[in-house]
Image (cartoon, rainbow, N blue to C red):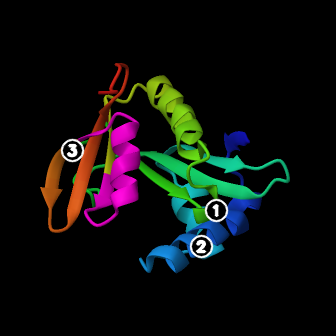
């Protein structure tokens, strides 16, 4: 498995991953290449957007880490990062999420972030488990959303 920074050439493969997730979960979300480019690859607040690819170059999943800007829709304080993880169903339980988070955590440390927020649907059991396993802890719950926080620079695993 190859973990690297996402490029404009990855937008179509990242879009495919989102469509596979939608097909599995029924959770609609924007997923076209233009959205991927604007919100993940070329986002001005981006710290790092990583992809995981198999030996053939197929994208298995991706993870975005952006800096929280004033007035962000998640209510995350400035100085924190906001993370989003998207792993295709065929890549579950293969270490993709762990590998992606290692890259994001290193980027967060280099960017001197204090904390990282993960905004997860309360019904997204696999997402909640994933972030908990990575060391995130719940700090806020509202209207079907669970927000978990990771403290950068210290061991977070229970």
Using the image, tell me which numbered label, if any, was put on residue 22.
none
Residue beneath the point at 57% across and 55% down: 92
Q: On the image, numbered disc 1 is attached to which residue?
A: 90
Q: Quadrant of residue 27?
A: bottom left
Classify mark 3: residues with Cα within 10 Å, few (<14), some (14-19) or many (20+).
Answer: some
Q: Secondary structure at mark 3?
A: strand
Q: Is residue 27 above or below residue 125?
A: below
Q: Earlier in the sequence, mark 2 or mark 3?
A: 2
Which residue has dot 2 on it?
20
Q: Residue at x 46, y 48 (%)?
A: 45
- Residue at the outermost front position: 93
What is the spatial separation of the Cα atoms under label 3 and label 1, in whole angstroms?
A: 28 Å
Alpha carbon of mark 2 to alpha carbon of mark 1: how far? 9 Å
Query: Residue 106, percent across and down?
Result: 52, 27
Tell me where the magenta segment starts and ends, as one range. 119-137
Please say whether residue 120 is one of the residues in the magenta stretch.
Answer: yes
Q: From this viewpoint, is residue 70 visible?
A: yes
Question: Looking at the picture, how far across and down is residue 26, in whole percent?
Answer: 44, 80
At x 45%, y 31%, the residue is: 108
Q: Nearer the viewer, residue 8 or 89?
A: 89
Tag 1: Cα neighbours inside 10 Å, few (<14), some, or many (≥20)? few
Query: What is the crowding at mark 2: few (fewer than 14 residues within 10 Å), some, or many (at least 20)?
Result: some
Secondary structure under tag 2 reads: helix
Between marks 3 and 1 in the image, the one whose residue lies nearer the viewer: 1
**Residue bearing mark 3:** 138
Residue 151 vertical position relative to residue 66 in the rendered view, above or below: above
Counting every numbered tag in the picture gives: 3
Compare marks 2 and 1 and give the one earlier in the sequence: 2
Q: Where is the N terminus found, in terms of image quarters? A: top right
* Quadrant location, the C terminus: top left
User: Are the residues tagged 2 and 1 within 8 Å (C-beta)?
Assistant: yes
């Amino acid at each position: 498995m190859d973990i690297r920074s996402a490029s404009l050439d990855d937008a179509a493969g990242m879009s495919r991953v989102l469509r596979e997730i939608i097909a599995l979960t029924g959770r609609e979300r924007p997923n076209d290449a233009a959205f991927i480019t604007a919100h993940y690859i070329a986002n001005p607040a981006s710290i790092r957007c990583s992809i995981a690819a198999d030996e053939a170059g197929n994208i298995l999943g991706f993870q975005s880490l952006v800096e929280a800007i004033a007035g962000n829709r998640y209510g995350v304080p400035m100085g924190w990062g906001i993370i989003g993880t998207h792993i295709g169903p065929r890549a579950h339980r293969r270490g993709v999420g762990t590998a992606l988070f290692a890259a994001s955590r290193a980027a967060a440390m280099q960017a001197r972030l204090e904390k990282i927020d993960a905004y997860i649907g309360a019904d997204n059991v696999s997402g909640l488990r994933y972030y908990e396993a990575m060391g995130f802890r719940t700090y806020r719950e509202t209207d079907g959303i669970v927000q978990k926080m990771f403290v950068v620079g210290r061991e977070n695993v229970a």
